[in-house]
Image (cartoon, rainbow, N blue to C red):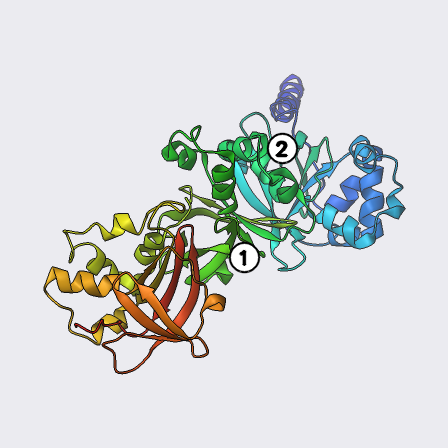
Amino acid sequence: MKNLFKKAFLALCIISIAACSDDDDTTFIPPTTTIADLVADNAEYSSLLAALERTDLDVTLNGTGTFTVFAPDNDAFADFLDGTPLNDVPVATLEQILLNHVLGTTVTSGQLTTGYVNNLATESSTSANLSMYINTSNGVVINGVSTVVQADVAASNGIIHFVDEVIPLPTMLTFVAADSDLSSLATTATTTSGFDTDFAAVLSGADSNLTLLAPDNDAFAALGDISGLSAADLEQILLNHVIGGINISTGLATGYGNTLATYGDTMNNLSIYINTDGGVSFNGISNVSTADIVASNGVIHKVDAVITLPTVVTFAIADATFSTLVAALTTLTPSTDFAGILSTALGTDPAPFTVFAPTDDAFAAITVPTDENDIAAILNYHVVGGANVRSTDLTDGAVTTLNGDVTIDASAPSVTGAGNTSASNIIVVDVQAANGVIHAIDQVLLPAAN
């Protein structure tokens, strides 16, 4: 009997020790308890439950799935609503706010890392899922506004992380302010005095519908000292990183778009050359490092270099269809610094320029001269100095280039050189640089002597 008692007592002790050895912070949930059940059973989350029931998302979170829910308590809802009754919030809006707290996969706190994830809320015009910025440098903070106060509460269909604030639908400004890797951009855009543009208002506006190409801190560091730039010049550089419309990376294609920067004091927006042949790059100098950071009012693509204001040379180099032209401007004419001349800043003679730029196919149709002087004569015949002549400004008749007159047919539109037997079609118009404009043509213009 004594031995039997000892064995029974020992077994009981082993069981007790095993139970006590588990992490006291771990919450044990019966395998059939759903996320919706957990919220319903906790009085501190009655506001969340009411919101879920009003949008029928309680049904979703009571079903099968693999969800991660960042769950705000009653105090968080009270702060967010600020006296507005929950029933006064439109159901569609409330649904998106709640989905902004839900991931479609189960992610424990140990699996969370600093960076972006997508939740189940969507941007209205594209239906792309909204992004969420997680910062794990000191606890877990979401979008710079909401902190996890209790993590890893397991349910049968996912996991809950309880948070201290409701997470509002993010704007582009939300991410620029929350992402420490964009602090240089945030500081420059929102604290520089003398701007006509209120960048904070633009990035936070509900109906902005913009694409922001956001240079990271390393990109600003590589740019160097910007203290010597005027506020007007710096403002234009920042605007050169903003494209109208929401352009998800999968919808981008190689070709030209326009930024919100403008040529001189006009309303003519600068062009931007997008190349998607290998990743996504802009103007041949800046590459997308993180794509599709989706906000409620736009999309951000992080880029690795500041996109400075383009010259006509910028586009000639960036656009592969002008590779022969670039060779002619550089290696084939070493005695003349054509690239330097055509990079002359606006307001400095001989800028601005209007360039009729032959494509590679146009050059392939002729025998390119071997004599540097002959090549220089042809190149000068494609440049109008001191004028930014856009397609709407073209008129029939002669236009004087740096090497004689060419003839414009504005209705075609086309341009004919004195030594050509047929007109060269203008196949791409108004590639607007900061110091002039390019029109691509399908034949090389030949002066009379050639």
User: Residue at horizontal 63%, vertical 18%?
Assistant: 6
User: For this rendering, which residue is in front, 200 or 247?
Assistant: 200
> Residue pushed farthest left?
371
Which numbered dot is residue 396? Answer: none
Mark 1, residue position: 247
Mark 1 or mark 2: which is in front?
A: 1
Q: Amino acid at mark 2?
A: Gly
Give x and y (percent) for residue 268. Answer: 52, 56
Q: Give the secondary structure at mark 2.
A: loop
For the question of whether residue 34 can be seen, the reply is: no
User: Residue at horizontal 62%, vertical 37%?
Assistant: 143
User: Residue at horizontal 59%, vertical 52%?
Assistant: 210
User: For this rendering, which residue is in front, 24 or 95?
Assistant: 95
Please rate how many residues cluster around mark 1, counting C-alpha atoms within 10 Å: few if below 14, some from 14 to 19, many from 20.
many
Quarter of the figure that contains the C terminus = bottom left
User: For this rendering, which residue is in front, 375 or 135?
Assistant: 375
Mark 2, residue position: 144
Give x and y (percent) for residue 192. Answer: 55, 30
Give x and y (percent) for residue 384. Answer: 34, 61
Number of marks in the rendered image: 2
Distance between the Cα atoms at labels 1 and 2?
Answer: 25 Å
Q: Specify whether 258 is left or right of 91.
A: left
Please rate how many residues cluster around mark 2, counting C-alpha atoms within 10 Å: few if below 14, some from 14 to 19, many from 20.
some
Q: Amino acid at mark 1?
A: Asn
Give x and y (percent) for residue 2. Answer: 65, 17
User: For this rendering, which residue is in front, 15 or 118?
Assistant: 118
Placement of 203 over or under 191, stated as above or below: below
User: Residue at horizontal 12%, vertical 60%?
Assistant: 372
Figure quadrant of residue 386: bottom left
1 or 2: tag closer to the N-terminus: 2
Q: Give the secondary structure at mark 1.
A: loop
